Image: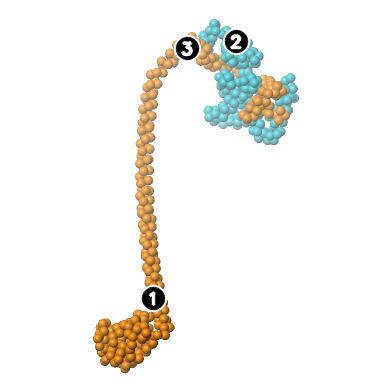
Amino acid sequence: MLKNTYLKSDISFISSPRRVKRYPLTKKHKISLSEEELVLALTKREKVAVEALYDMYSSSLFGVISRIVIDTPVAEDVLQETFVKIWHSFSSYSTEKGRLFTWMVNIARNLAIDKIRSKDFKNQTKNRELENNVTFIDEQRNTVYKPELLGIKELVGTLKPEQKSIIDLVYFKGYTHVEAAEELGIPLGTIKTRLRMAIQLLRKHFN
Amino acid sequence: METGILELYVLGDITPDERLQVEEMMSKHERIRTEVAEIERAMELYAGTNAINPSTNQRDKNLNSLLTNFADDSTFATKKPVVKDNVIMMPVAPTTNNFYKYAFAASVTLLIGSLVALYNMHNQLQESNTQLAVLSSQNQQISKAVSFKDQQLINKDDQLQRFNAQLAGSSAQIGKMIGFKDKQLGIFKDTSYKLIRLKPTGKVPSANMTVAWSPAKKKVIIAMAALYMPKNDREHQYQLWALVGGKPVDLGVFDKTASDTADMKEMKPIGSADAFAVTLEPRGGSVNPTMSELMVLGK
């Protein structure tokens, strides 16, 4: 509590009323901008952009990160690293290369994969109790359906299970389609076809 | 487009080269741009259906981490000089201290390293010297062997020269012999020569010899090959006499030796003679023949 108060006063000091409009950190409602406005604000490095960025994308990015990093506190660290990286390397993003989210989800996925491959993380997993180990490894390796993570009731029926498992492996877990083919024991050509079909179905579904 | 490369582009599962290709196509073709945008939108919405809200305290934590950085960016200029002074003033003393500390540590490390290197170099040098000594002794052995071979070669050369000399000598002898044979042949061919066979007088019954005499050319030649006489000793020599009008005329001395059997010996010239005789006389010959030592006689 003490820390929070200190930080709050610190921030309000930085954003003096003369320079930038005041945005209290503990807001009741979330900020939302159009993608163009957000990109512009981020380019100008405005404070409002940071909040809008978090409010608009934190849950989607955290969804992806949580599929790779199961341990919630660690996943939260990765989320923070992701936002720091987005903020610092924003100059390397260009609208010509695609949507902002596509760029950000790549950063999040890569950081999450780096984390589970890092030495720290491996040491940490070694310290886990043996009985938990089996389920943990299962969670790491397989595409276990976790209804609490998915929230896709409306999608049931749109994607066939085999299409869904491929798209989840590649999009959420950061497998290459070659690795996915090995994991699922399916020929590479089939993987590519199913991936394309699945995305076309999603396009139809969201239109 | 049908290959699914645009989907892989959006999923981030693409090589850097392919990525550049897609981006180039996107910049050129509106249709591809639209296609990619639709795929991206679908994936973004799909991610939205899988979204998980981080716990509410995460929002402050995240924003603070970004906004702390926000302050580091040159967003508030008025505070800058103060911060700058503080930042620069504080570390001055420790860095100098640290510098000398590290410099000293580095020097010591360097010194130890140098000593180790020196020691190693010394060892290597000694090793090299030993090797050099071994090599030079080998070298000496080799040069000894070479000079020995040289000596052998010189010896061979000498032998060869000697052999050549012998050969030359032999061929000279052969030439000489051929000359003699020619001479002999000439004598035999020459019709002016008379061959006179001297016969034993009884002192040595087996003694006989042949004298070739050309009264026209006044030449007297003894064929040593046909000289069947006992060997004379060192104090004595055989002396050839011509009897001219009952008086002996000295025609010179000769030896009977084993070696020069092939030779022909030309004696003193004489134009006329009744007979030829040989006596054994003291070495160098006598003025008058010792008749008791008459060996052979012939006309």
Task: Decide if residue A196 is in sight here.
Answer: no
The answer for which chain carries disc 1 is B
Q: Nearer the viewer, residue B179 or A125?
A: B179
Q: Which chain is orange?
A: B
Q: Amino acid at mark 3?
A: Lys
Quarter location, residue B47:
top right
Q: Nearer the viewer, residue A143 or B258?
A: B258
Q: Nearer the viewer, residue B260 or B265?
A: B265
Residue wearing tag 2: A27
Name the colour assigned to chain A in the rendering.
Answer: cyan
- Do pointers 3 and 2 mark residues of a single chain? no
Q: Amino acid at mark 1?
A: Lys
Residue wearing tag 3: B80
Task: Decide if residue A96 is in sight here.
Answer: yes
Task: Please report the residue visible at 70 percent of the width from the left and 22 percent of the height from the top.
Answer: B30
Q: Position of residue A61 (x, y in %)?
A: 62, 21
Residue wearing tag 1: B176
Q: Which label lies toward us, 1 or 2? A: 1
